[in-house]
Amino acid sequence: MRKLVMCLTLAFATTLPALAALPPQYQRQAELTAVLNIATEVLGIGQLIDGIELSEPDVYSVRSGTCTLTVRIVDTPKKREPGWAGPREFEAVPDPLAC
């Protein structure tokens, strides 16, 4: 009986759709790249970025001189077929620049 329960559990677990995400270090790298791109767009290439800090989950603070730009990571899921797995789909959305 115990073997039957284990087999049924294994069979059930393997039939569920898998959700695959990037490993944490690659996800963070993708977020930082998006934050850097949007910050450069907002600040312009003439202003140096002094620092980027993760202030809370999915919220980054970008410092440039006396200015601070808050950039939020927002999910942008697309309709996919059931069982589709892949990296998190998101975009970096800037708040108004505070100087």
Image (tube, helix red, strand yellow):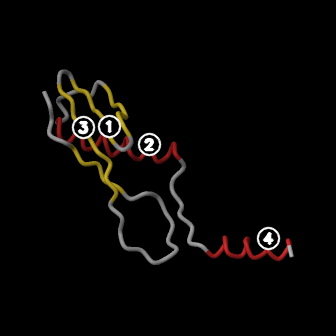
Q: Are marks 3 and 1 in contact (CB under 8 Å)?
A: yes
Amino acid marked by disc 3:
Thr
Amino acid marked by disc 4:
Met
Q: CA distance from mark 3 to mark 4?
A: 49 Å
Quarter of the image with the N terminus is bottom right
Q: Earlier in the sequence, mark 3 or mark 1?
A: 1
The residue that disc 3 covers is 70
Amino acid marked by disc 1:
Tyr
The residue that disc 1 covers is 60
The residue that disc 4 covers is 6
Q: CA distance from mark 4 to mark 1?
A: 45 Å
Q: Earlier in the sequence, mark 2 or mark 3?
A: 2
Residue 29 circle label: 2
Q: CA distance from mark 3 to mark 1?
A: 6 Å
Q: Are marks 4 and 1 in contact (CB under 8 Å)?
A: no
Q: CA distance from mark 2 to mark 4?
A: 39 Å
Depth check, mark 1 against mark 2: the one in front is 1
Q: Name the residue rendered at 32%, 40% in the picture.
A: 59
Label 2 secondary element: helix
Q: Name the residue rendered at 26%, 41% in the picture.
A: 71
Depth check, mark 4 against mark 1: the one in front is 4
Amino acid marked by disc 2:
Gln
Find residue 32 and report its horizontal and vertical position in percent: 37, 41
Residue 17 circle label: none
